[in-house]
Image (tube, helix red, strand yellow):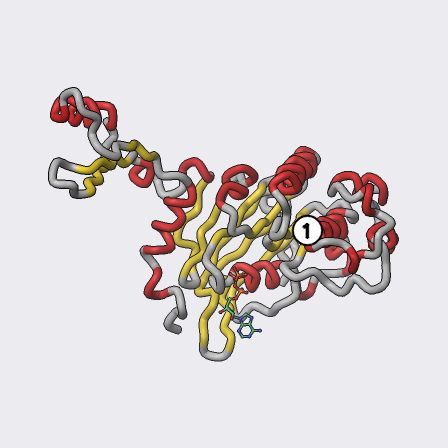
Amino acid sequence: METRDTESTSAIRVRGLQKRYGDRVVLDGIDLDIAPGETYALLGPNGAGKSTAIEILEGLRRPSAGEVSVLGRTPLSAPRSWRGRIGIVAQQTGDLGPFTARELVARFHRVYPNPRPVDKVLHLVGLTERAGVRATKMSGGQQRRLDVALGIVGRPDLLFLDEPTTGFDPDARRQFWSMLRTLTEEGTSILLTTHYLDEAAHLADRVGVLSAGAIVAEAPPESLGGPEARIPEVRWRDANGRQRIERTDAPGHLVARLQREWGAQEPPELEIRRPNLEDIYLDLIGADAPGRQGVPS
Ligand SMILES: Nc1ncnc2c1ncn2[C@@H]1O[C@H](COP(=O)(O)OP(=O)(O)OP(=O)(O)O)[C@@H](O)[C@H]1O
């Protein structure tokens, strides 16, 4: 059944999505809403089902159960015109054949009704200088940039990025982030998977954590896990040499108390840490660790 009516409010709308491989349940009833123009990062450990979910949304895999609407259409039965409105950067680089970067971008350019100019795309991904090089002779990071170029040349309304910056050097990653900002300013919706938590924090309006077949937390990166997860930790070594860790909303008070106790001496190994997104993420998936290898059906 087509669900065109959701398009005005959602780029992606998923209800009760389930995917089984044999008797193994990989996705166990996922709900997901991504608004037009929103950037959403799907996080989760290796094997959590992120690529499976994305490939279902791209119409490349069949869900076992549930409703999936992408740009108002059911991906598996969507027409060709729908495919022209999505951009895909898959986890694996595809077959690049004997072509140069420019030739590949130009080939994809011809397929779309309203593509970005080839030179503009090469510039956006930082490949202008390497445009005449045979793609198979480029470095891993440059090939990944080319994957991104092929994903955006069609000026997609919705862009799927499956671990897009794997193999990028830090400078290339920064350039990529700023390129994505250009796309979001133009209104592109983005669904991203990444293992780089700083990338999710930098790019995403919201992040979702997929673990043991379910989205166990979903929020803007700065509030994932709730206020409780962000309470600072004070660490020090006590007079008996034991490591002490106390979580408190008033770390200054605790430090002042310790300083009074230690007098002129510095409290040994004293530090205050505020949990960052990576700490909170690890906590969230750690809590589900025993179930991570498989979900009971
Ligand atoms: N065609 C398939 N047949 C059987 N099992 C599969 C198939 N494709 C994926 N799986 C299994 O489904 C689980 C989820 O895989 P998926 O690639 O979606 O995870 P992921 O979250 O993208 O992992 P990663 O972070 O490593 O990319 C894995 O255990 C994988 O082995």
Q: Can residue 111 be seen in this view?
A: no
Q: In which quarter of the image is the C terminus?
A: bottom left
Q: Residue at x 23, y 27 (%)?
A: 250
Residue denoted by label 1: 141
- For numbered disc 1, what is the local secondary structure? helix
Residue 203 percent location from the top left of the image: 56, 39
Where 141 falls versus 296 (above or below)? Answer: above
Where 146 falls versus 201 (above or below)? Answer: below
Residue in the foreground of this view, choosing between 223 and 130: 130
In the displayed structure, does residue 23 sit left or right of residue 61?
A: left
Most extreme residue toward the bottom is: 22
Q: Which residue is drawn at 72% across and 50% down?
A: 142
Residue in the foreground of this view, choosing between 264 and 109: 264
Mark 1 packing: few (<14 Cα in 10 Å), some, or many (20+)? some
Q: Which residue is drawn at 78% across and 47% down?
A: 153
Residue 239 percent location from the top left of the image: 12, 36
Q: Residue at x 63, y 59 (%)?
A: 91
Residue 283 percent location from the top left of the image: 34, 50
Residue in the foreground of this view, choosing between 80 and 269: 269
Identify which amino acid the numbered label 1 is placed on.
Answer: Gly
Residue 184 percent location from the top left of the image: 65, 37
